[in-house]
Amino acid sequence: MKKKGMELSINFLVIIILSLVMLGLGINLLVKVIWPASEDLIPKVTDEIDARLKTMLVANQRLAVYPSHLEVNRKQSDRFSLGILNTDPSRPFFVVNVACKRFIDSAGNTFACDSANLRLLYNGAQKKIENNDKVTQGIGIEVKPGAPSGNYELEVSVCSGNPTISSCDANSPFIYTDSVIVYVDVP
């Protein structure tokens, strides 16, 4: 009887050890594969685009986007990059807001944007940019499957002082510089 009791204890220990190993492998998979994939939703600025934006900002342009015109098919995504140059030492805190302002269909009719057609992916959190520093940020655009063909105009606004993303648009008292329009064509 003791031998059977010993086998049961050993089998139990083997199952516990195998379960812990499987749990460790599952956590490892989650941390190394799935977690970084979610961080990739907000696009990164490549070195080439970063250099191009910083060159544009050298000319004392406070806000630059590249490219300013995109063609994105339904169920696809693309990105543009934004560069900000701080030239005001009294206002080091910045917020970026991107909003779809209008939609122009293939017949030339203008409509208000339906936010259900595009998904904008970017970090709208407040950033600190020191005087004469340049910061770049990627902004992703995903076109939903049912989006109508035409041209979407996205307004990129940058506010400084002590703004929040909800208070940052072209009419905000916190506006840092003129807003920039990015055109997204959906064929």
Image (spheres, grey):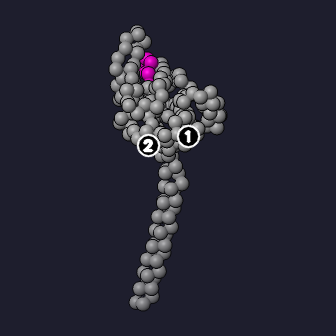
Q: Nearer the viewer, mark 1 or mark 2?
A: 1
Between 15 and 3, the one lying in front of the other is: 15
Mark 1, residue position: 131
Between 13 and 68, the one lying in front of the other is: 68
* Residue 174: x %, y % from top left: 40, 33
Decide: few, some or many residues near mark 2? Use Cα within 10 Å; few <14, some 14-19, many ≥20: few
Left or right: residue 119 versus residue 53 is left
Is 10 in the magenta?
no
Q: Residue at x 50, y 56 (%)?
A: 31
Magenta part of the chain: 149-154
Task: State the quadrant of the N terminus.
Answer: bottom left
Secondary element under disc 2, as helix, strand or loop, is: loop
Establish if 114 lies above or below 19: above
* Residue 9: x %, y % from top left: 43, 82
Between 125 and 73, the one lying in front of the other is: 125
* Residue 103: x %, y % from top left: 39, 19
Left or right: residue 50 versus residue 70 is right
Q: Residue at x 46, y 77 (%)?
A: 13
Q: Residue at x 52, y 49 (%)?
A: 36
Left or right: residue 134 versus residue 8 is right
Q: Is residue 158 visible?
A: yes
How much space separates mark 1 and mark 2, taking CA atoms? 19 Å
Mark 2, residue position: 125
Badge number at residue 95: none
Magenta stretch mostly in which secondary structure? Answer: strand
Q: Which residue type does callout 1 highlight?
A: Asn
